[in-house]
Image (tube, grey):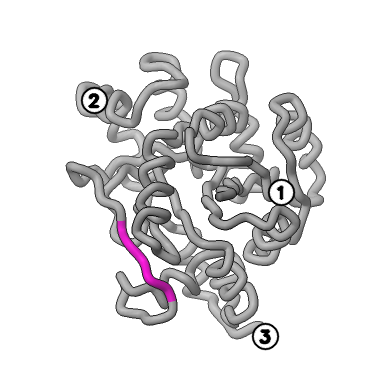
């Protein structure tokens, strides 16, 4: 059983340029992100899906330092970039992660993977109906599900964000193409943002790393935010999945 984790990482960012290369304590957010993924007990291999953009060399240098392979693909067609990253590996299952989640929890990663495999699901995630903090997003799915999306997705939004075609056609969302399951947290904390899209997000992440540590459990970060209302409210007004909402607003058929 081969479980391939792929994290998306690119240099360009509209709201916070080179956000994944920002440092806390001399360590980039990308390196923290990758190290946390590598703590997973169920992932067979980790790869980075990046781009040929100027600045990508900083990303690949970090990958080389940690012994993580990468593939450079389309800037805008992220579905194709993701598929081409996976294709040579012939995995049974894929785990999709994104590098704007520097404090992704390996225990949550393994929870979603185990749920997907044990349940025989085509797709399992904790994002269909969010209950975990934004920044703890994990999707696990069969390679065949990704390949079907790559072949059949027609909308621009479905190519910019990798899994919308799967999600829209998942059984959880009333579809029939993909048997799916939504992993829920013991308590709904989806109002929290432990992700990096804007400068306010970085200030919160910086506070968590400096005061809690770069390798703690999600619950530890939640406890700190609950105890420090001023930090928790730094980014509380930012909309979740704003990038996808913009894609939907400008959607069109592309093939």
CA distance separating discs 3 and 1: 23 Å
Residue 103 spot, x, y in % from top left: 45, 32
* Residue 57 in magenta stretch: no
Taking 253 as reference, is 162 above or below it? above
Instruction: Say whether residue 168 is visible.
Output: no
Q: Quadrant of the C terminus?
A: bottom right
As helix, strand or loop, the secondary structure at mark 3 comes to loop
Residue on which disc 1 sits: 50
As helix, strand or loop, the secondary structure at mark 1 comes to strand
Taking 17 as reference, is 26 above or below it? above
Q: Magenta span covers which residues?
A: 178-182
Q: Which of disc 1 and disc 3 is earlier in sequence?
A: 1
Q: Which of disc 1 and disc 2 is earlier in sequence?
A: 1
Looking at the rendered structure, which numbered label has been put on residue 223? 2
Q: Nearer the viewer, residue 78 or 45?
A: 45
- Residue under the image location 60 percent in, 85 percent down: 253
CA distance separating discs 2 and 1: 33 Å
- Residue under the image location 55 percent in, 72 percent down: 158
Magenta stretch prevailing secondary structure: strand
* Residue 179 in magenta stretch: yes
- Residue under the image location 62 percent in, 55 percent down: 91
Characterize the local packing of mark 1: few (<14), some (14-19) or many (20 or more) Cα atoms within 10 angstroms.
many
Rendered image quadrant of residue 215: top left
Residue on which disc 3 sits: 255
Residue 150 spot, x, y in % from top left: 63, 73
Looking at the rendered structure, which numbered label has been put on residue 2? none
Q: Nearer the viewer, residue 139 or 202?
A: 139
Q: Which of disc 3 and disc 2 is earlier in sequence?
A: 2
């Amino acid at each position: 059983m081969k479980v391939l984790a792929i994290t998306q990482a690119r240099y360009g960012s509209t709201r916070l340029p080179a956000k994944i290369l920002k440092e806390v304590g001399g360590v980039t957010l990308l390196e923290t992100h990758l190290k946390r993924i590598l703590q997973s007990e169920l992932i067979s291999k980790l790869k980075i899906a990046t781009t040929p953009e100027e600045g990508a060399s900083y990303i690949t240098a970090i990958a080389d330092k940690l012994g993580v392979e990468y593939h450079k693909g389309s800037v805008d067609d992220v579905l194709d970039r993701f598929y081409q990253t996976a294709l040579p590996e012939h995995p049974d299952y894929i785990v999709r992660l994104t590098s704007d989640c520097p404090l992704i929890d390996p225990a949550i990663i393994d929870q979603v993977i185990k749920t997907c495999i044990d349940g025989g699901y085509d797709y399992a995630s904790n994002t269909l109906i969010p209950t975990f903090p934004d920044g703890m997003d994990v999707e696990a799915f069969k390679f065949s599900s990704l390949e079907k999306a790559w072949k059949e997705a027609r909308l621009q939004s479905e190519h910019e964000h990798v899994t919308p075609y799967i999600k829209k056609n998942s059984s959880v969302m009333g579809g029939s193409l993909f048997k799916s399951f939504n992993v829920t947290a013991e308590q709904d904390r989806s109002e929290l943002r432990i992700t990096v899209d804007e400068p306010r997000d970085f200030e919160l992440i910086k506070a968590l790393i400096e005061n809690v540590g770069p390798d703690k459990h999600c619950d530890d970060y939640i406890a700190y935010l609950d105890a420090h209302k001023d930090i928790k409210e730094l980014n509380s007004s930012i909309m979740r999945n704003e990038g996808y909402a913009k894609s939907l607003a400008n959607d069109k058929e592309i093939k």
